Image: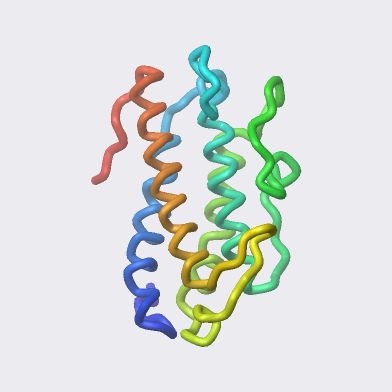
Amino acid sequence: MEKNTASTRMQGFLTLFDYHTTFFAKALDGISAENMHNRLNTQANHPAWLAGALVQQRFLMASETGTGQRQTGEDLFKNNKGIQPGVQYPTNDEYLKDWERITPEARHALVSIDDQKLNSEVDTGGMKMTYYDLISFTIYREANMIGQLALWRRLLGYPAIKYD
């Protein structure tokens, strides 16, 4: 797997991206469809929403490559749409297939982005930042959401994520 990046500033992000790639499947492993929608009588985002929002974020990351791929549940997540009560979200299998389909494209985007692009400004819909800052936030958010899924595993009575 390619480890050289067009910008040396992306090398650490690429390492984290590769970790997140494997951790996502491990975070979903064995969680039932019923528990994916369980909010434990709280206002917290349930695992199905967290998983779909994470997949959507990978599709957005890959949008730089311009192929126009979309995740199965895109309508549930586009434009940063929040959780919708009473909605049946895609299955873990659908999320994992989408994740596997888009990850090589998103990885290629990270490998190929250069310093000029990283320093350019992007408007995220109300907030302007550099691409570098956007990628920093995106990688942080992936870790955050995988951590939330790991916590939900324990709260719902599943074993902890296996990092082997």
Q: Quadrant of residue 140?
A: bottom left
Q: Quadrant of residue 124?
A: bottom right
Rendered location of residue 53, percent (x, y):
58, 44
Q: Residue at x 72, y 65 (%)?
A: 68
- Residue at the farthest left position: 164
Residue 20 vertical position relative to residue 116 in the rendered view, above or below? above
Left or right: 4, with 112 as reference point: left
Rendered location of residue 149, percent (x, y):
42, 34
Q: Nearer the viewer, residue 129 or 156?
A: 129
Q: Residue at x 53, y 39 (%)?
A: 51
Q: Nearer the viewer, residue 114 or 154?
A: 114
Q: How is the image coloured?
A: rainbow
- Residue at the farthest top position: 41
Q: Nearer the viewer, residue 122 or 109?
A: 122
Rendered location of residue 21, percent (x, y):
42, 54
Q: Residue at x 47, y 85 (%)?
A: 115
Rendered location of residue 161, percent (x, y):
31, 36
- Residue at the farthest right position: 75
Residue 91 vertical position relative to residue 143 in the rendered view, above or below? above
Q: Quadrant of residue 17?
A: bottom left
